[in-house]
Image (cartoon, helix red, strand yellow):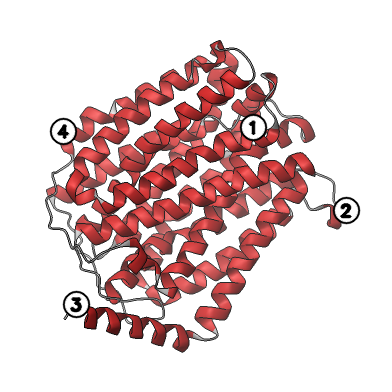
C-alpha cells in the first residue's frame, strides 16, 4: 500500500462502474446532500434567535459544539462495532434518528426562555448527533470498501453534494425563517432527510465482512502519520465550526446584513469548496506524492484568510463586505485542498502498518476521522464563541488562523524536512505489530 511520500503512480481505477458501485454512490450522495442541508440551516438565524431568548454567545457556541462532541463519542463507538451492528443498518437508523430530531428542534421556540430552552437544545442536538455519526461513519467505511482504488476521487465527488447542501442550507434556512418563522426550516429539512431512509433501504447493498479483532483505536493512533493527519482534520473542522457559530452575528452587527443575506454570504465558503472537491480528489488519487504539499499549502492559505476575515485589529483595516466575501472564498478553496487527501492517507497508512483490508479497519479509520472532525467542530464554536464574547470576532478568527499556521508548520517540519525519520518510525511500528501477531 502507498503512504505519504510514496512517489509511485496510483493504479488507474476502472472506468466503468458496477451496479453495486452506482447504487452506493447514489446512496452516499443522498446522505451527504440531505445531512448537510439539515446541519447548515441553523447558521443564518439560530444564533440571533437564541440571543433573543437570553442565551449568551458562549452558550450559543456550546450548543453548536455539543453536537460535535456527541458525534465524536458516537463515531468512536460505532466505528469500532460497525461489523457487529451492520453498515447498512447504521446508515438507515442514523438517518431516521437524525431526521426526527431535526423536526423536533423546530418546535423549541415554543418553550420558555432561558434554562429550559438551553437544556432542550442540548438534548435534541445530542441525540441528533448520535444519529448523524452513525450514518456518516458507516458511509465513509462503505465508500472506501466499494471504491478501494479511488477513494479520494470518490470522496471528492461526494463533497460536491456536501457543498451543495452547505450552499443551499443557509440561504434556504434564512428565506424560510424570514417567510414562515422558526419552525418551517427544520420541519422542511427534517422531512427531506427522512425521505432518504426508504431510498437507502431500497438502493443500498448489504455488506457482510469478517472482523479483525486485533484492530483497535489505540493501535491505530500510535502511528505518527495518523496523528499528524488527525491534527489536520481537527484544525479544518475547528475553522468551519467557528464560522457556523459566530459569522452570522458578526455579519448582522458589523456588516448590517439580514438573516437572508447572511445565508447568501455563507455561499462564499461552500461554493468554492464544493466546486474544487472533485478536482482535488482526482489530483490526490493520480499524484499521491503531492498530497503532503496540498495539506501544507492549503493550511497556510487558510491561516492567511482567517487573519484577514475580520480582519485582525493589528492590521488596522476596517471590516468590509467585499473583504469578508473574498476571504470566505479563499477559506473554501484552501480547506478543500487540505481536507480531500486526508481520508485516503489515513487508510493507506493503516494498511501500511499491518491493518487488514476489511470493513473492520475501514470502520476504525472512518470512526477516527469522524471523531477528530467532531472534536474540531466542538473546539471551534466553543472556544471561538468564548473568545468572541470576551474580545471580538476579529481576534477569534485570528486564533483560528494561528491554529492553521501551526498545522502547516508541523506538517512541513515533520513530513517534508525529515521524512526518513517518520518513515523509519512507522516501519518499526509495523515490524513490532507483525511480531506480536506471529
**What's the CA distance linking mark 3 and mark 4?**
40 Å
Q: Earlier in the sequence, mark 1 or mark 4?
A: 4
- Foreground mark, 3 or 1, reads 3
Residue lying farthest to the right in this orientation: 316
Picture disc at residue 202: 4
Which numbered circle lies on residue 437?
A: 3
Q: Earlier in the sequence, mark 3 or mark 2?
A: 2
| Badge 2: residue crowd in 10 Å (few <14, some 14–19, many ≥20) | few
Query: x and y percent of residue 247 in the render?
Result: 66, 39
Quick check: 118 above or below 227? Answer: above
What is the spatial separation of the Cα atoms under label 3 and label 2, in whole angstroms?
60 Å
Tell me where residue 63 appears, x and y as whole percent. Answer: 57, 33
Report whether 64 appears left or right of 165. Answer: right
- The residue indicated by pointer 1 is 262
User: CA gap, disc 3 to disc 1?
Assistant: 55 Å
Position of the N terminus by quadrant: bottom left
Q: Nearer the viewer, mark 3 or mark 2?
A: 3
Q: Please tell me which residue is depicted at 47% across the width and 54% down the height of the picture.
A: 276
Q: Residue 387's x, y, as percent?
A: 73, 46
Alpha-carbon span between mark 1 and mark 4: 37 Å
Asked whether residue 127 appears in the rendered view, the answer is yes
Amino acid at each position: 500500500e502507498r503512504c505519504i511520500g510514496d512517489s509511485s503512480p496510483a493504479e488507474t481505477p476502472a472506468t466503468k462502474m458496477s451496479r453495486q458501485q452506482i447504487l452506493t454512490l447514489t446512496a452516499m450522495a443522498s446522505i451527504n446532500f440531505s445531512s448537510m442541508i439539515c446541519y447548515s440551516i441553523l447558521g443564518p438565524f439560530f444564533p440571533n434567535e437564541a440571543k433573543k431568548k437570553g442565551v449568551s454567545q458562549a452558550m450559543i457556541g456550546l450548543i453548536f459544539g455539543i453536537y460535535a462532541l456527541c458525534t465524536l463519542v458516537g463515531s468512536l463507538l460505532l466505528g469500532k462495532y460497525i461489523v457487529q451492528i451492520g453498515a447498512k443498518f447504521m446508515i438507515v437508523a442514523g438517518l431516521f434518528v437524525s431526521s426526527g430530531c431535526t423536526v423536533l428542534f423546530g418546535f423549541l421556540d415554543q418553550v420558555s426562555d432561558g434554562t429550559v430552552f438551553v437544556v432542550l437544545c442540548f438534548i435534541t442536538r445530542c441525540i441528533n448527533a448520535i444519529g448523524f455519526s452513525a450514518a456518516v461513519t458507516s458511509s465513509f467505511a462503505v465508500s472506501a470498501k466499494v471504491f478501494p482504488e479511488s477513494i479520494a476521487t470518490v470522496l471528492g465527488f461526494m463533497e460536491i453534494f456536501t457543498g451543495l447542501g452547505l450552499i443551499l442550507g443557509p440561504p434556504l434556512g434564512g428565506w424560510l425563517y424570514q417567510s414562515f418563522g422558526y419552525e418551517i426550516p427544520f420541519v422542511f429539512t427534517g422531512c427531506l432527510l427522512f425521505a432518504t431512509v426508504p431510498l437507502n433501504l431500497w438502493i443500498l447493498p448489504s455488506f457482510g465482512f469478517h472482523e479483525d479483532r486485533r484492530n483497535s483505536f489505540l493501535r491505530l493512533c500510535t502511528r505518527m502519520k495518523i496523528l499528524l493527519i488527525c491534527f489536520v482534520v481537527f484544525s479544518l473542522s475547528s475553522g468551519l465550526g467557528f464560522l457556523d457559530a459566530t459569522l452570522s452575528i458578526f455579519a448582522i452587527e458589523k456588516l448590517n446584513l439580514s438573516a437572508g443575506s447572511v445565508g447568501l454570504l455563507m455561499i462564499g465558503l461552500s461554493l468554492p469548496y464544493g466546486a474544487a472537491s472533485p478536482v482535488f480528489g482526482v489530483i490526490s488519487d493520480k499524484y499521491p506524492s503531492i498530497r503532503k504539499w496540498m495539506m501544507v499549502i492549503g493550511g497556510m492559505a487558510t491561516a492567511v484568510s482567517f487573519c484577514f476575515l475580520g480582519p485582525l485589529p493589528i492590521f488596522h483595516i476596517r471590516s468590509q463586505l467585499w473583504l469578508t466575501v473574498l476571504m470566505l472564498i479563499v477559506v473554501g478553496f484552501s480547506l478543500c485542498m487540505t481536507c480531500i487527501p486526508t481520508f485516503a492517507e489515513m487508510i493507506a497508512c493503516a494498511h501500511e502498518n499491518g491493518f487488514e483490508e476489511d470493513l473492520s479497519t475501514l470502520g476504525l479509520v472512518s470512526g477516527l476521522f469522524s471523531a477528530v472532525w467532531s472534536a474540531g467542530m466542538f473546539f471551534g464554536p466553543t472556544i471561538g464563541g468564548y473568545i468572541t464574547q470576551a474580545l471580538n470576532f476579529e481576534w477569534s478568527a485570528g486564533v483560528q488562523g494561528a491554529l492553521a499556521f501551526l498545522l502547516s508548520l508541523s506538517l512541513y517540519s515533520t513530513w517534508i524536512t525529515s521524512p526518513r525519520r517518520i518513515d523509519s518510525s512507522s516501519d518499526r511500528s509495523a515490524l513490532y505489530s507483525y511480531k506480536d501477531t506471529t
